[in-house]
Image: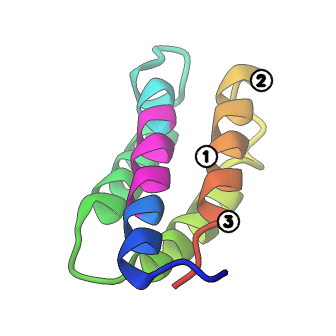
């Protein structure tokens, strides 16, 4: 039984909102380096714009977040939150 396109879009938007919420914790963490905070803010902004499909927004965010997660200056908890949001975003398909 396949999901209707509208229901899938709603589920994808819900996953994006959860990922944005997790990324917001990283942005608001004072131990997060400024360059990483700025990059994550850009990711949050691009995920929030609804000018493209959820799949395209998620794919663009995945590329940036994957690079950010490899930064040695990132704290363990922030890295874990980024990985959790990556997992959510990887589930999104158009």
Tell me, for residue 76, which label it has, or none.
2
Magenta stretch: give its range. 13-22
Residue 34 shows in this picture: no
Viewer-closest of 52 and 9: 9
Question: Could you tell me which secondary element the residue under label 2 belongs to?
Answer: helix
The image shows residue 27 at horizontal and vertical percentages of 42, 30
Residue 59 located within the stretch drawn in magenta: no
The color scheme shown is rainbow
* Residue located at (38% from left, 60% from top): 13
Real-space CA distance between mark 2 and mark 3, rounded to the nearest whole angstrom: 21 Å
Q: Residues within 10 Å of mark 2 (few under 14, many from 20)?
A: few
Above/below status of 74 relative to 30: below
The answer to whether the residue labelled 1 contacts the one labelled 2, judged by CB atoms less than 8 Å apart, is no
Tell me, for residue 67, which label it has, or none.
none
The answer to whether the residue labelled 2 contacts the one labelled 3, judged by CB atoms less than 8 Å apart, is no
Tell me which numbered mark, 2 or 3, is placed earlier along the sequence. 2
The image shows residue 67 at horizontal and vertical percentages of 68, 60
Question: Could you tell me which secondary element the residue under label 1 belongs to?
Answer: helix
The image shows residue 61 at horizontal and vertical percentages of 51, 65
Of helix, strand and loop, which mostly describes the magenta segment? helix
Tell me which numbered mark, 1 or 2, is placed earlier along the sequence. 2
Residue 17 located within the stretch drawn in magenta: yes
Residue 54 shows in this picture: yes
Real-space CA distance between mark 1 and mark 2, rounded to the nearest whole angstrom: 14 Å
* Residue located at (48% from left, 17% from top): 29
The answer to whether the residue labelled 1 contacts the one labelled 3, judged by CB atoms less than 8 Å apart, is no
Q: Residues within 10 Å of mark 1 (few under 14, many from 20)?
A: many
Tell me, for residue 90, which label it has, or none.
3
Judged left or right of residue 83, residue 44 is: left
Tell me which numbered mark, 1 or 3, is placed earlier along the sequence. 1
Mark 1 or 2: in front is: 1
* Residue located at (42% from left, 52% from top): 14
């Amino acid at each position: 039984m396949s999901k209707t396109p509208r229901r899938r879009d709603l589920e994808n938007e819900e996953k994006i909102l959860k990922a944005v919420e997790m990324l917001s914790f990283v942005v608001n963490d004072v131990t997060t380096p400024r360059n990483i905070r700025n990059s994550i803010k850009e990711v949050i902004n691009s995920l929030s714009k609804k000018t493209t499909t959820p799949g395209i927004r998620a794919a663009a965010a995945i590329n940036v977040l994957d690079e950010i997660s490899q930064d040695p200056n990132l704290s363990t908890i922030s890295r874990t939150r980024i990985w959790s949001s990556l997992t959510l975003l990887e589930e999104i398909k158009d």
